[in-house]
Amino acid sequence: MTGETICDLLKPLIGMPGSIFVVARGIGQIGFAVTDNKLTGVEVRPDGLVRLDRETGWTVLDPGEVMAVAWNGNAGHASGQFL
């Protein structure tokens, strides 16, 4: 997956509560809770990695290792909505 695709999928979720999940090659599902720590920004860095900014920190992903992105807007349910 490209960094631009990940950004396009996540930008509409900025400020929304819920959980974001990515499936990373060789690791599996990784979750980012954004219910109390909302997503505040997402961008492709000059080195091609994707930076997710949240209210209290940030995360950097290698888009080449991401196989799927999911968002669950209902914190009470574990299943995600694949974008």
Image (tube, rainbow, N blue to C red):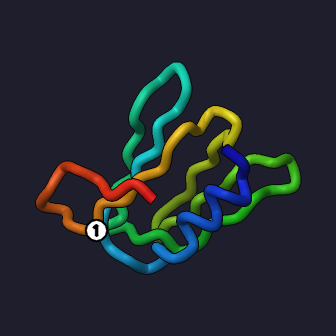
Task: Give the residue furthest to the right.
Answer: 46
Expressed as whole percent of the image width and height from the top left, the position of residue 23 reads 47, 37
Task: Give the residue furthest to the top.
Answer: 26
The C terminus sits in image quarter: bottom left
Expressed as whole percent of the image width and height from the top left, the position of residue 3 reads 72, 53
Please, is residue 45 above or below residue 23 in the view?
below
**Can you identify the residue that label 1 sits on?**
73
Q: Quadrant of residue 6?
A: bottom right
| Left or right of residue 6: residue 69 | left
**Towards the viewer: 33 or 10:** 10
Residue at 59% x, 72% y is 41
Residue at 20% x, 66% y is 74
Residue at 37% x, 59% y is 71
Expressed as whole percent of the image width and height from the top left, the position of residue 7 reads 64, 63
Q: Residues within 10 Å of mark 1 (few under 14, many from 20)?
A: some
Count of all numbered marks drawn on residues in the image? 1
| Left or right of residue 43: residue 66 | left
Task: Give the residue furthest to the left.
Answer: 76
Expressed as whole percent of the image width and height from the top left, the position of residue 37 reads 37, 67
The N terminus sits in image quarter: top right
For label 1, the SS is: loop
Residue at 63% x, 33% y is 65
Question: Mark 1: which amino acid?
Answer: Gly
